[in-house]
Image (cartoon, rainbow, N blue to C red):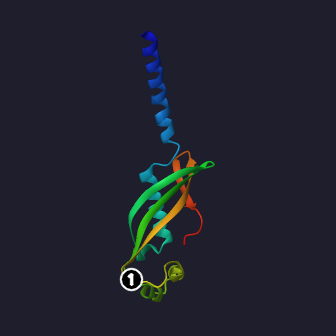
Amino acid sequence: MKRTFAAVLASLFVVVLVIPARAADHPDHEDALAQIKQHVIEAQFSTRTLLTDMEYVNGYRDGNDYIVVAKWTTTFPQSAKALISSGETHIAGLELIFGDFPAGASFQRRKSFRFMETENGWMYEGVVGAWF
């Protein structure tokens, strides 16, 4: 009986030590999505789009980094032609990415993002691959 109790106690001790350590192996989902959303807004015609339904899809280790796969919906309140005619230089490639779309058009997006582990936690590094 003493051996069984000691084995259970030892197992519990290992579980208590291992579970918190595993949590640091990847970015917190909510924190990762907040960082991704900020960078997606900056990269995707910030004031001209609405981003909704952002969701953590998956994640995996890539060497020392961590890759987070996220999906979201990008909605354009204005048509492609109206946005392009505004003359803003950061909108120049809009039609190359999304084509000619009407006002209110929505697009499902899914991308992978790289995170680097730092002394201050997991930090967004950038998109994996091209934006389009």
Quadrant where the N terminus is found in the figure: top left
**Classed neighbour count for the residue bearing mark 1: other residues with Cα under 10 Å, few (<14), some (14–19), many (≥20):** some
Residue 70, x across and y down, in percent: 47, 60
Rendered residue at 49%/79% (across/down): 98
Residue 47: percent from the left, percent from the top? 41, 75
Taking 44 as reference, is 34 above or below it? above
Asked if 109 appears above or below 78 in the picture, the reply is above
Quarter of image, res 49: bottom left
As drawn, is 116 to the left or to the right of 16? right
Q: Residue furthest right?
A: 63
In the picture, the quarter occupied by the C terminus is bottom right
Q: Residue at x 48, y 69 (%)?
A: 42
Q: Nearer the viewer, residue 61 or 77?
A: 61
Reading the image, the residue beneath label 1 is 78
Q: Position of residue 11 (x, y in %)?
A: 47, 24
Q: Is residue 77 left or right of residue 112?
A: left
